[in-house]
Amino acid sequence: VQLQASGGGLVQAGGSLRLSCAASRRTSSDNGLGWFRQRPGKEREFVAAISWRGGSTDYADSVKGRFTISRDNAKNTMYLQMNSLTPEDTAVYYCAVSRYSGVTKPPSNYQYWGQGTQVTVSS
C-alpha cells in the first residue's frame, strides 16, 4: 500500500489547513489510520487516529479541540482538518496505516507510511 499525503503549506497563526492522505488501494484487512508529525529537532509524535469504521478517534492532547480526523473508505482517503494553528504545529505531517482495526498511538503499531507533507505556521 502506498500513501500520498497532501495539503500542507504555509499558513498564518490562527489559520486552517486540511491534509489529505490517499491510499493506492484498500488493505486486505480492516485497518485503523493515523496522523503523526515530526517537528524540527523532535522525534515523530502521534497526532490523531481513527478506527476502521470511523466510529472511534483519538487525539494528542496538544491538538484536541483544534484538529479533526476523518476518513472516506469508499475513496481510500483520510483527512486531517487543522484549525487554530499555532507556530508549534509546524512540522512534517505523516499519514500511516495501522496493523489493527481500532485506534492506536505507538508508531510501531503502524505498518505503512506516507512520505510526509510540510506544514509551516507563521506567527
Image (cartoon, rainbow, N blue to C red):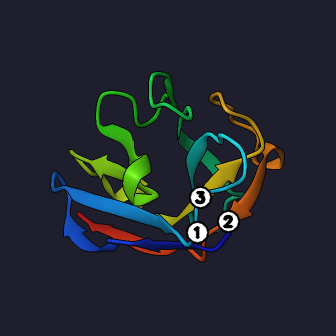
Q: Nearer the viewer, mark 2 or mark 1?
A: 2
From the viewer's perspective, is residue 40 above or below residue 66?
Answer: below
Label placed on residue 26 = 3
Q: Quarter holding the N terminus?
A: bottom right
Look at the numbered discs 2 and 3 and tell me whether their residues touch, using CB distance below 8 Å: no
Q: SS class of the residue under badge 1?
A: loop
Q: Amino acid at mark 3?
A: Arg
Q: Residues within 10 Å of mark 3 (few under 14, many from 20)?
A: some
Q: Residues within 10 Å of mark 2 (few under 14, many from 20)?
A: many
Could one spot residue 38 in this view of the protein? no
Q: Residue at x 65, y 40 (%)?
A: 30
Q: SS class of the residue under badge 3?
A: loop
Q: Position of residue 44 (x, y in %)?
A: 68, 57
Q: Nearer the viewer, mark 2 or mark 3?
A: 3
Q: Amino acid at mark 2?
A: Trp
**Label 3, label 1: how far apart the Cα atoms are:** 32 Å
The quadrant holding residue 21 is bottom left
The quadrant holding residue 84 is top left
- Closer to the camera, 6 or 42? 6
Q: Is residue 83 left or right of residue 70?
A: left
* First in residue order: circle 2 vs circle 3: 3
- Residue under numbered circle 1: 40
Could one spot residue 50 in this view of the protein? yes
Q: Is residue 25 left or right of residue 105?
A: left
> How many marks on residues?
3
Q: Quarter holding the C terminus?
A: bottom left
Q: Is residue 105 left or right of residue 11?
A: right
Q: Amino acid at mark 1?
A: Pro
Q: Residue at x 37, y 41 (%)?
A: 70
* First in residue order: circle 3 vs circle 1: 3
Q: Residue at x 69, y 32 (%)?
A: 104
- Residue under numbered circle 2: 113
